[in-house]
Amino acid sequence: MLGGPGTGKTTLLADAAAERVLHGAEPDSLLVLTASRRSANAMRAEITRRLTASGEHEGRTVREPMVRTVHSYAFAVLRLQAGLNELPAPRLLSGPEQDVVVRDLLAGDLERGAPDWPRELRPALSVPGFAEELRDLLLRAAERGLGPEDLGKLGRQQQREEWVAAGKFWRQYEEVNLLLGTGGNALGIPGSPALDAAELVASALVELEGDPELLAREQGRVRHLFVDDAQHLDPLQFRLLRLLGGGADDFVLAGDPDQAVFSFRGADPSLLTGADRDGDRTITLARGHRLGRAVHEAVATVAAHLPGGKGHRGPIPLASEDGVVRTKLLPTPASEASWIADQLRRAHLIDDIPWSEMAVLVRSPGRSFPVLQRALGAAGVPIASATEELPLAKQPGVRPFLALLRLASDPESLEADLAEMLLASPLGGTDPLALRRLRRGLRRLELAGGGNRSSDELLVEALRDNDILAGLADAEARGVRRVGELLSIARRAVTRGDSVEDVLWQVWQASKLERRLLKQVTRGGSLGAQADRDLDAIVALFDAAARYVDRLPKASVAGFTEYLGSQHIAGDSLAPVAMRGTGVSLLTAHGATGREWTVVAVAGAQEGAWPDLRLRGTVLGVERLVDLLSGVDSEKVSAVAPLLAEERRLFYVAASRARRVLLISAVQGEDEQPSRFVDEIVNAAGDEPAEVIRGYTKERALVLSELVGELRSVVCDGEQEPERRRLAARQLARLARAGVPGTHPDQWYGLGPATTEEPLRSTEDVIRVSPSTVDILAKCPLRWLLERHGGSDPAQLAAVTGTLVHALAEAAASGADGERLKAELDEAWARVDAGAPWFSRRERRRVEKMVENFMAWLRGSRAELTQLAIEQDMEVELPAAAGELRVKLGGRVDRLELDQQGRPVIVDVKTSKTPISSADAEQHPQLAAYQLALLLGAFAEHGGKPGGARLVYVAKSNNKSGAAQREQPALDEETGPQWLELVRKAAAATAGPEYAAQENADCDRCPGKASCPVRPEGRQVTGP
Ligand code: SF4
């Protein structure tokens, strides 16, 4: 039975199956096979509905499920056979497990020097992609009925050494799986034969072909065999079905060769089209029941260019609705995603279409899902499912639990990174600021105790032994205590010998995460969605633990964490678990096969991405093997044509999932062009009914937050018409009464009254300022306030390299030679997190260069300067009359030198890349503050009259002086009092309660600009 999308193939099969039962056939004599578990569930529900609707079937029970997938049927045959022979039932080797076995074996091969593999392939053996490709090759070969020896033979015939090697590898792989199954596992526990998907079907086929009794029994039982979506069958499955259905009363294969999109998994649609060569037993369904007229026409346009017979194409649309096709080209992926979000919201709010009746389909999830998830989330469109692409051990919700289990069984493996991950995870609940506070607190205690361990070491120590926390404030130590407690619970359970499942359960209960996550889920939004995913992942973790314990009851916790940690690919059990009913489905086009929705958005239809015509050349030649076994000489035919056809079929499948509204969107920019499929639809449709909007005019999306934003901006914009502003205010007031967040001015940032008018400091306090704070205060008091109270990041790379260069310069000036400097830099750099390796190398070279420049400057300046001290602390109190503020000026001078006239000279080493101008240097507050301190007697032992000050820019080489220099003349009787006044004013400015924002040349580099009223980016905090 052939038929295009929506022609009723599945419905007809369900009808036929129900009819058979209603007319007296034993339910057990029926077998309906579908392509996936989801379709099997849907089909089962359909048949049951028909049976119960008739009322005749009530009360009857069915021994075997009538609807299954081919794999599930093969599994049932094997289990039955194993039961009869009193052998353990087989079990399905999941994708991730299979991957682990393949990689283990490859690692073993490599240790032996991989003599069987061609020399040029040996370096690839340890790459995860190679293992995946090898699995693929073996699966494809198995599906086409080959065994290890056949693959080797074919390799010799075709002179493909890699196939010969793969054949040998396959033999090993089978032996290992057999070993796993017959009790040869490390713990000596009898297991069941472990079979992968292809082996499952192959083994069932072998059983049926080799055991006439079994075959006769199965053929006798299954009298009506219906197969839906038969275009997805691979050769082995097809053989199995033909064997089973050969003698049945009904054997129906239903499908649409144009919807065959799984050739990469081994499917071969020619099996369906070739099943009835004469065509006299083929029915073609010619009437479309699903697609609206416009959708139907768009889909037919795409299908018209497909190769192959056209007999089953072009059904006459019978659906009562006209349908809508909207095609839109937008300038960026983000605007495309917001357009889709807006369209879906309109469909939901205006046309009353439930979220579950909508889907967004894409070609490549890695590229499109994050943007779409963000846009849909921001617009308040709930997402029903996001395909998890990560292996279980890498899922954010699972990682901390696995780390905790690993630590519980191997406490020595605790390192700083792991400690930090656990503390920052939901188990520790420590945010980055609190983490920094904790590190600082631990260091403080360490220094006070006379030790000098790094904060990394102290973090590890704190998790191992809570005693060290005694000197910390409760808030600082909370996260460590929490994780430490969970760790000891897990450790106690592991020592008692509890099973993996039990240990996990105890940790989970003690973590009290369930309540927190559930609360987040009910609050919704992006945090809610993440909490949802975390919960799913944790359920999957328990599931994996249960399966592991079932299989290996005596296995250790360490074994489990290692087993999960070694999985590099995602298992197939996750995606269905992640499905939730009430949202829009976000899926790949492949994942949408066999399903349908009222509204479907096909997103990211870009030329180059869909169709993706990159040749899928593989090092092991999987595609060549498949062609060869299908009788195609791929060396002679075009490799692109079949790729294009498959991509077109995929687009056809995606577009034909829509019943009423089809949205097609793409990005059109300098580098991106819409797909040829989009052009075909647009050209074929003319103006109507496809609506093509080129370019992008920003309209307000149908999202409450956008409306509130627009109303607020109108109300606050003095240039708007008064009437418009009044109306906007009225609408805001209405929304505020309805409790919409962000509408009432009380909730607007920047409009609330100040929470306190108290000054930061009392006038009795002695105010301490350093020359560098004087510099900042002189330029902008607000910047000082913001930086001083959390607005700057001392962990930033520039700050870290600055400190490092100062330390190295100090060591160099104290006589360290090049060798020692390099060793110190090596040691320090190993602890610096400088990001990507290339960037880290570049930064390191920059640091080395700065030290070289400094050395050159040092050598060159000795003729006029003599070193007096390095990194010298100083503090002086400014003279103050009664009632005036008491101010202490203190800090550390990088270098104190003596000039030729015997006067002390201040030298400040700068690591910034651009030196200031000479004129600015003369007015440099930091240098002047140092000189002032000198004048006031800070270094009285070296004389009271300063000889000026210098800035040395070590990041900028200079042929004459080694590094660029800027000088400030010596302070004298005239300039000294002026600077004294400036420092006094700067100190007074720290008291508050008001801090002026003074725009200056450094504003662009100011870390507080996002909170500053004079900057446009700060308006979000300070303006209405
Ligand atoms: S951006 Fe400029 S004005 Fe604003 S706080 Fe920073 S330095 Fe001051």
Image: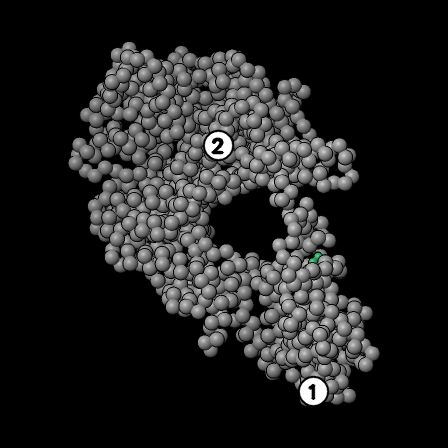
In three-dimensional space, the C-alpha distance between marks 1 and 2, rounded to whole angstroms, equals: 76 Å
Indicate the secondary structure of the residue bearing disc 1: helix
Residue 820 screen position, x and y as percent: 56, 78
Question: Does any portion of residue 290 appear in the rendered image?
Answer: yes
Report ligand 1 position as a quadrant: bottom right
**With 515 as the anchor, is 954 left or right in this view?**
right
Looking at this view, is 305 or 565 the one in front? Answer: 565
Indicate the amino acid at tag 1.
Ala
Reply above or below: 852 against 363.
below
Depth check: give the residue in front, 881 or 354. 881
Residue at the (26%, 44%) spot, across then down? 550
**Count of marks placed on residues:** 2
Residue at the image position 36 percent from the left and 33 percent from the top? 143
The residue that mark 2 highlights is: 583
Q: CB atoms at circles 1 and 2 under 8 Å apart?
A: no
Please give left or right for residue 902 compared with residue 665 in the image: right
- Quadrant of the rendering where the N terminus is positioned: top left
State the image quarter where residue 892 is shown: bottom right
Instruction: Tell me the residue that label 1 is attached to.
Output: 940
Instruction: Locate residue 709: give its quadrant.
Output: top right
Q: Quadrant of residue 790?
A: bottom right
* Coloration mode: one colour
Say if residue 158 shows up in the picture: no
The vertical placement of 1018 against 375, above or below, is: below
Q: Earlier in the sequence, mark 1 or mark 2?
A: 2
Residue at the spot 29% in from the left edge and 19% down from the top edge? 30
Q: Give amino acid for label 2.
A: Gly
